[in-house]
Amino acid sequence: MTERTASDRLTVVIAHQSEEPIYEQIKRQFRQSIMTGLMQEGDSLPSLRQLAKELRVSVVTINRAYEDLEKEGFIVTAAGRGAFVAKVSKESLKDKKLKLVEEKLMESIELAESYGISRADFIKMIDLLFPRQKHG
């Protein structure tokens, strides 16, 4: 049996000019790959040193991303064996997806408020941008 690795299916892309910290970019890409099913339970992640070398970033940066992903329940680490995608129940996965969308919506609401956009106009924007969802 061959071991599936994240490297087999996921290419992590770093935007060095982005305001988003590099460790957050790494976390976001791994998290999304796990939540969409691209990476599955038991898949191994690249070693800290391997990924740091590939991305040309510090091992400390990769370690921070992996530690955060472990705290969030997306990966597990085993001393001497590496990091692996954790078992995530469908309900837990749904909760994680809802939480992430909620965080992004809060950021959007704060931005809209700072620009003086009304609640009614904000909701109209959502309706225009998210037409598949019917109200009723």
Image (cartoon, grey):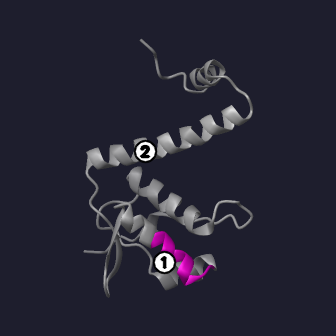
Q: Quadrant of the C terminus?
A: top left
Image point (39%, 71%), residue name:
5
- Within 10 angstroms of label 1, few (less than 14), some, or many (20 or more) residues? some
- Location of mark 1 (residue): 63
At 55% from the left and 43% from the top, the residue drawn is 104
25 left or right, relative to 101: right
**Relative height, residue 136 to residue 46 (above, below):** above
What stretch of residues is rendered in magenta?
57-66
Label located before the other in sequence (1 or 2)? 1
Label 2: how many Cα within 10 Å (few below 14, some 14–19, many 20+) = few
Residue located at (41% from left, 56% from top): 38
Q: Whole-percent x and y of residue 122?
A: 63, 25
Main SS class of the magenta portion in the image: helix
| SS under mark 1 | helix
Instruction: Using the numbered discs, state the Cα–Cα distance from disc 1 to disc 2 in whole angstroms.
Output: 24 Å
In the rendered structure, the answer to whether residue 61 lies left or right of residue 32 reads right
Q: What label sits on residue 99 in the rendered view?
A: 2
Q: Is residue 99 shown left or right of residue 127?
A: left
Q: Residue at x 62, y 18 (%)?
A: 120
Confirm whether residue 49 shows in the render.
yes
Q: Amino acid at mark 1?
A: Asn
The secondary element bearing badge 2 is classed as helix
Residue 26 vs 110, above or below: the answer is: below
